[in-house]
Image (cartoon, grey):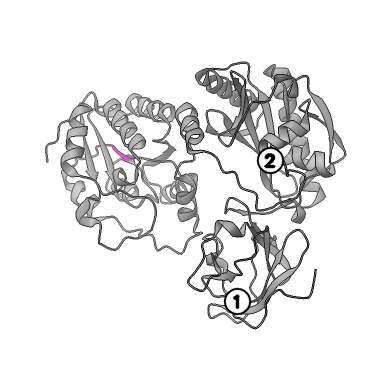
Amino acid sequence: MSSQPATAGTQRVSDEGFTLPANIDATTDVLFDGRRIWSIAPLEFRLDAAGDRWVPWPRLLLPSLEGVTTVTVMEHSNERVIFEEEHAFGTDTDTLRFEGPGGALRVIDKWGFIQRPFAHQSQEIREDLLEGAELILTILREDCDLPAWIAFGSLLGAVREGKMIGHDSDVDLAYLSKHEHPADVAREMFKVSRALQAHGLKVSTRTGSFCAVTVQSEHGRATPIDVYACFYVGDTLYETASVGAPIPREAVLPLGTVEFEGRTMPAPADTEAMLEASYGPSWRVPDPAFAYHTPRSVKRRFNAWFSSSMKRRRYWDRVYSGVFDIDIPTDPSSFAQWVLPQLDAGAPVIDLGCGNGRDSLWFARHGHPTTGLDFSPAALGRVAKAASAADLPATFAYVNLYDYRSTVTRAALVARDLAAPRTVYARFLLHQLEPDGLATAWSFLDITLRRGGRAFLEFRTHRDELLPHTNDGYRRFLDPDKLCREIETAGGRVVD
């Protein structure tokens, strides 16, 4: 590390962020007490009134910014120090530590998420992850008859250095689909998920062309392995929503091999062509701040083809995991207290978008068997434990209104298990849905209430726009008249 800072004598660090000289354009590392915690691409940040680039701290880092540390900002490629400054964050006078449970070192990755990179993981954990990857590749090849290989960051590390990239945090795998039509690709992905689950693996389907497999290490860490469906449409190979390029089929098959952490792993026939398609012509140069700049047309196309079970979900997982400093009420809402006397004694309630379950538990405490539904595993896990501990008649399950398959499946199960007439309760859900999610919500109500029942819906309107809000998550301010028309179009009748 060069000890000669490019600038000195100017206070650049604050609790909110830091300033960077405008002439810095290369990937830049941010260190706390000599340890890298974040890397940035400076040109992605705006210029302030003084002509410097203003770099706000990542949102997920903010709750940890309490204490004293030496902030060093330096160029990644040559370790030239741009500036170095001691700063006391907040009122804490102890040393600032950005660590996980047990003192595990953490970083903010290129997506803005908190990760534990391979550079800070034990060899035992990495070996467990590699064994999991080999098992998945075997299942794809032998059970699913699909050619599969290590991909993206894993392939990049293998070709460049023969090992995992230090700032990477997961293993990427891909397979070549037998199909070209997106609907067939999605059906195939669900078959792949079932094949993996049949071997006892925990699978989370993220989109119709992408799933994540969690590998639980015997050495105390659960790590995801991402599995992507690659497919051709004409001469274009689509690898993810971020990568679509005219790659010749002979660049993919027949598969070759590459050394990865001392193991021989399958790889595309032309690894350089695949890496250039994914990372551009400078793929040989390490860049922890690399980001895809995907055309909006490609994103829209992929969303239409495969949807995504992750839309808006990460935010709420963080809210209910306590990552953000948000005071979430636990007492029953005034809306729930208004609804309760209107329910028949012992009538079951379906709490759609139950969140932390404050109202689900309220209904259950008053003798109403309650089914709480949400798309945040963090929320569902916590409220299910609370209901079990209190021995309440409440169950909780996953539903994702941005996933039509998930929605109609859950609605059908509810309709099967709960006798009509049914009550669906949805508080502060509708205005947090994008239009496609709202349309799917109407389908849920149609299926669950088709044989009779009522829905109690509370949502924000334009009258709420200037009022204070508990969180800064996505929200719209709905027109009640328009919403009533949508309900009637979906087959409902507004009675109050």
- In this rendering, does residue 382 appear at all? no
Q: Is residue 313 magenta?
A: no
**Mark in front: 2 vs 1:** 2
In the rendered image, which quarter contains the C terminus? top left
For mark 1, what is the residue?
67
Q: Is residue 350 magenta?
A: yes
The answer to whether 334 is drawn above or below residue 243 in the figure is below
Q: Residue at x 57, y 67 (%)?
A: 64
- Picture quadrant where residue 92 is located: bottom right
Foreground: 34 or 200? Answer: 34
The answer to whether 388 is drawn above or below residue 22 in the figure is above
Q: Residue at x 79, y 52 (%)?
A: 122
| SS of the residue under disc 1 | strand
Q: Is residue 394 left or right of residue 219?
A: left
Q: Residue at x 19, y 38 (%)?
A: 482
For mark 2, what is the residue?
280
Q: Is residue 272 left or right of residue 280?
A: right
Q: Characterize the local packing of mark 2: few (<14), some (14-19) or many (20 or more) Cα atoms within 10 angstroms.
A: few
The number of discs equals: 2
| SS of the residue under disc 2 | loop
Sequence-wise, which precedes: disc 2 or disc 1? 1
Position of residue 98 measured from the top left corner of the image (x, y, whole percent): 64, 66
- Which kind of residue does numbered mark 2 sit on? Gly
Position of residue 229 measured from the top left corner of the image (x, y, whole percent): 62, 27
- Which kind of residue does numbered mark 1 sit on? Gly
Position of residue 46 measured from the top left corner of the image (x, y, whole percent): 51, 62
Q: Which residues are magenta?
A: 347-351
